[in-house]
């Protein structure tokens, strides 16, 4: 997916310039944001006393800012609250690629890496708004139907914000790519798609009587 | 999933002791290895000049050692080859949990974080063997059917090994957990399962005539 030279894009330097297979790179806002908005689970790399940690967490995006949340007592969030560099990565594995040689085995995928300085969302109102945005991003219309958060719940929660300073996307969608000479060999080769799908919703066993699944969730259906 | 006190387990210290929701923690080899062997995609956190990076990659396990591979010219692998600390994380998202309050929204998941010092697999024979193990781990029986790697292909490839020094697993399988008082509210709550499934294999359009899908791949079927 090439970046039009005039497209609005994140700046590129030695940190985020894709070197390996750089024909798969993109830096434009449209590609980066589409990948960010297409996922919900990320992995955050951060450093504690020189030791890298890779923590899975939910995240959401507003403009050029990424957010994630957790306990006010969380080690990761307390460390990042001090204004630390972080890297937030979102990955979609689209297929396994079985080639005729071991070497040409590969995968189709879409991934995005975002770099910035994490900071704590201090303002209680901004924090409360961000948490509404988190629920609404996954389940549009749901927040207004919920028992609202208490002051204690908001206090127990920390929200980290990170303005995206640099970002890179990398996408492979090539399927089987074998050496020309290998095509003649009597060896099976295929692309094996991998999908993430939803199962049947499991209603809580203690639902109040007469409740039906809200229409807002209709988009969240199996398959 | 509790760790039997006598079970063989990874050592626990301040780095890998689960503090948040620590009733979800496990450190025993059986749990950690099952999670590692159940996945194929990981995210590796590593540090370059103080900057954390979070890189998606395939991995495999042999005993207490994790492996991953790529180009001999890869920046990540060259950096890690120098004997750097890394954190390799494997995550399965099992469900979204929709509660009656925003605060109690959650997810069921299984994840494992492994810590160690990365190193380069220098010995060409060990490297070649590890790459066979990589193919065989995903596609048992397949390696022997492939066009073997050339010396140049092996040379172009780097394999990183990391002995697991510390590890932690964290698992949630609780579904909806609401405040007791909230159960009476007329608010929908459910567990929404998330699955990773395979699609229909797409055979290469240039297969040699008369080839059929090998029986070895029978386990890789849609659904
Ligand atoms: C799919 C998924 C989504 C998640 N979403 C969120 C979210 O939105 N908000 C949130 O707060 N948390 C989320 N988590 C949990 C998150 O990964 C952390 O466990 C949590 O944020 C606490 O982080 P901490 O650094 O304070 O943990 P601490 O308990 O202080 O971490 C100490 C040590 O415990 C171990 N550990 C911590 N977390 C994990 C883990 N997930 N797997 C294995 N070992 C671990 C590590 O060794 C770590 O060094 C999610 C986890 C998964 C798998
Ligand atoms: C599902 C999946 C599986 C993968 N499996 C493997 C594997 O087994 N072996 C392997 O070598 N590689 C694998 N990759 C690619 C891997 O993520 C790296 O791109 C590759 O290892 C090169 O790393 P590098 O540090 O040398 O990259 P460089 O090109 O030197 O990285 C420079 C910069 O490019 C950007 N960049 C690099 N990789 C990515 C990415 N994936 N997404 C977004 N931006 C990126 C970052 O900003 C990075 O700082 C996989 C990727 C995905 C998504
Ligand atoms: C089932 C087995 C394998 C799978 C699924 C696999 C998958 C991948 C993937 C996804 C990449 C990243 C490509 C990119 O950056 O876009 C990669 C890179 C690479 N793989 Fe593999 N691989 C496998 C086996 C092998 C073997 C056996 C070798 C060597 C004999 C090998 C050598 C390489 C090399 C050299 C790169 C780096 C390419 C580059 O950065 O230029 N792979 N592999
Ligand atoms: C759709 C919305 C939400 C989802 C999917 C979600 C998911 C999660 C997950 C998976 C965890 C990790 C639990 C663990 O470590 O095992 C978590 C932690 C947490 N969440 Fe949320 N959450 C959501 C909304 C909220 C909101 C709106 C609030 C506050 C009002 C909140 C407050 C917290 C707190 C305080 C923790 C830390 C728990 C602890 O470590 O003790 N969450 N959330």
Image: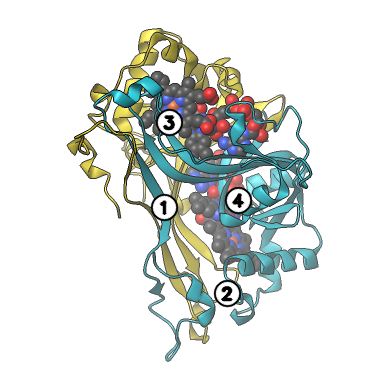
Chain colours: A yellow, B cyan
Residue beneath the point at 51% across and 72% down: A99
Q: Position of residue A168 (x, y in %)?
A: 46, 40
Q: CA distance from mark 3 to mark 4?
A: 24 Å
Q: Give the structural element (helix, strand or loop) at label 3.
A: loop
Q: The C terminus of chain A is located in which quarter? A: bottom left
Ligand 1 neighbours mark 4 (CB distance < 8 Å): no
Q: CA distance from mark 3 to mark 1?
A: 21 Å
* Residue identified by numbered label 4: B35
Are the residues under badges 4 and 1 in a single subunit? yes
* Residue identified by numbered label 2: A101
Image quarter where ligand 1 lies: top right
Q: Is A169 located above or below residue A175 in the figure?
A: above
Look at discs 3 and 2 and give the one toward the viewer.
Answer: 3
Badge 3: chain ID? B
How packed is label 2: few (under 14 Cα within 10 Å), some, or many (20 or more)? Answer: many
Badge 4: chain ID? B
Instruction: Report the residue that reaches farthest toward the bottom.
Output: B210
Residue beneath the point at 59% across and 76% down: B142
Ligand 4 neighbours mark 3 (CB distance < 8 Å): no
Q: Residue B195 shows which numbered tag?
A: 1
């Amino acid at each position: 997916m090439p970046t039009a030279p005039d497209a609005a894009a994140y700046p590129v330097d030695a940190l985020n310039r894709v070197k390996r297979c750089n024909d798969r790179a993109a830096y434009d806002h449209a590609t980066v944001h589409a990948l960010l908005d297409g996922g919900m689970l990320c992995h955050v790399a951060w450093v504690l006393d020189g030791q890298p940690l890779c923590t899975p967490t939910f995240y959401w995006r507003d403009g050029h800012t990424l957010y994630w949340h957790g306990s006010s007592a969380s080690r990761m969030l307390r460390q990042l609250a001090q204004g630390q560099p972080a890297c937030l990565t979102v990955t979609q594995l689209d297929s396994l690629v079985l080639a005729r040689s071991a070497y040409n085995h590969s995968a189709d995928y879409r991934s995005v890496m975002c770099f910035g300085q994490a900071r704590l969302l201090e303002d209680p109102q901004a924090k409360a708004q961000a948490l509404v945005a988190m629920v609404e991003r996954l389940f549009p219309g749901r927040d207004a139907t919920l028992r609202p958060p208490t002051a204690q719940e908001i206090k127990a929660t920390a929200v980290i914000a990170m303005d995206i300073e640099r970002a890179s996307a990398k996408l492979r969608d090539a399927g089987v790519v074998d050496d020309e000479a290998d095509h003649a060999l009597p060896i099976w080769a295929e692309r094996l798609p991998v999908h993430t799908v939803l199962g049947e919703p499991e209603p809580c066993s203690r639902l109040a009587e007469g409740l039906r699944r809200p229409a807002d969730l209709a988009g969240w259906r199996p398959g």
